[in-house]
Amino acid sequence: MPSSTVIKTCTPIVSRCVQTGTHFRLLAPPQQRRCFSILAKSKDEIATIREHLRNFGSTEDSVSLQLASELEHSSSLSKLGSTTALITLKNPASRNALTGKMMAELADTVDILESNESFQKSLTAVIVRGDAGFFCAGADIGVAKDHLLSSEGGRLMSTVMIDTLTRFRHLPFVTVAAIEGMAVGGGAELTTAMDYRIINKEAKLRFVHAHMGVSPGWGGATRLVRLIGRNRALELLGTAQPSDSDQSLKLGLVDEIVSSDSTMDDTLVTFLDRFIHAHPGVLHAAKEVVAGVEDAASFEEAVANEHEVFLKMWGGEANLAALTKAKTKKPKKE
């Protein structure tokens, strides 16, 4: 996908969208976007809070978005081509902890993934990773102390992050957290918003909130209970003990451990290769049905959603192509 395509399709959402190398970053508040959070009075309030948080950061920290096809050919991830996008968290001074600016940029990135027409047609997967071998250390402590330590500051941060991660969870793509080093506090919460989590053998997750005198505030506790159950979630949250890769796999907190004879990038390519060959629209429909089951208030509501998704797909491009292929396929000889 040409870089200009991304910039062009970003324009209706925000007043300007700039490119740094192969990374696309929104620099102005979105004009139209979905709002899942029940914590804010309106989407306009969340947009205002986002812009307030954007002031707290530096030129060194960022959240960037790029296609796998735009990576250097030396990276095995480039094999995933334009079917896969990568979100990279970068804050070298604080182990990729999220500053207010990064929280705003993460929300901007979700805007692009929700609204970019080219992505909706061709994208099947999104990988979230931290820069330089460390996933994310949660909220940046320095920024929190200086700007967000009041009750109101906590409300602003929690409101935006719950909205962003809830919207991220509803994206129609397969999402994967690539966990290297550690995912700590809010960083661990962030991983729970993904469909899948792949972890390095030496990496750990730690819901450290109890040691910091708080409880999760980015929706992570709710998602954690759904992932591993009430008792196991309470143990991780109440003890704040780190969970290594083997324990995390046993708990169901992660889906795969990078083997000793492989790398994170190679493991991601192998893992996602199963998905990227599917018709994007079909994969998006499957994600919509699965997400609908979790979000529905009743069995009847979930089935109704499945019915509606089916009707959108039946007789569509992918369905007709599959039927045509089936008709022309030669029968096997006895």
Image (cartoon, rainbow, N blue to C red):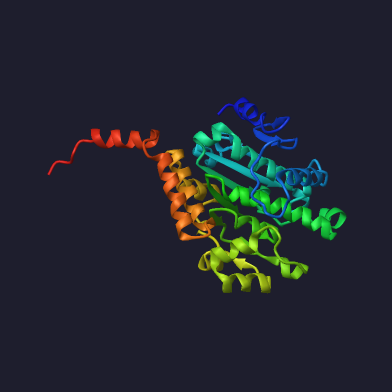
Give the percent coordinates (x, y) of residue 139: 75, 56
In this rendering, is residue 128 above or below 28?
Answer: below
Depth check: give the residue in front, 252 or 149: 149
Which residue is pictured at 71% across the width and 55% down the height? 39
Give the percent coordinates (x, y) of residue 52: 81, 45
In this rendering, is residue 191 above or below 83?
Answer: below
In this rendering, is residue 83 above or below 257?
Answer: above
Which residue is pictured at 83% across the width and 55% down the height? 148
Which residue is pictured at 47% across the width and 55% down the height? 302
Give the percent coordinates (x, y) of residue 241: 66, 71
Give the percent coordinates (x, y) of residue 57: 81, 46
Q: In what quadrant of the picture does the C terminus appear?
A: top left
Horizontally, is 285 left or right of 36 in the view? left
Answer whether residue 271 is visible to the viewer in this image: no
Depth check: give the residue in front, 189 or 282: 282
Q: In what quadrant of the picture does the N terminus appear?
A: top right
Which residue is pictured at 61% across the width and 56% down the height? 191
Horizontally, is 223 left or right of 306 in the view? right
In this rendering, is residue 328 above or below 262?
Answer: above
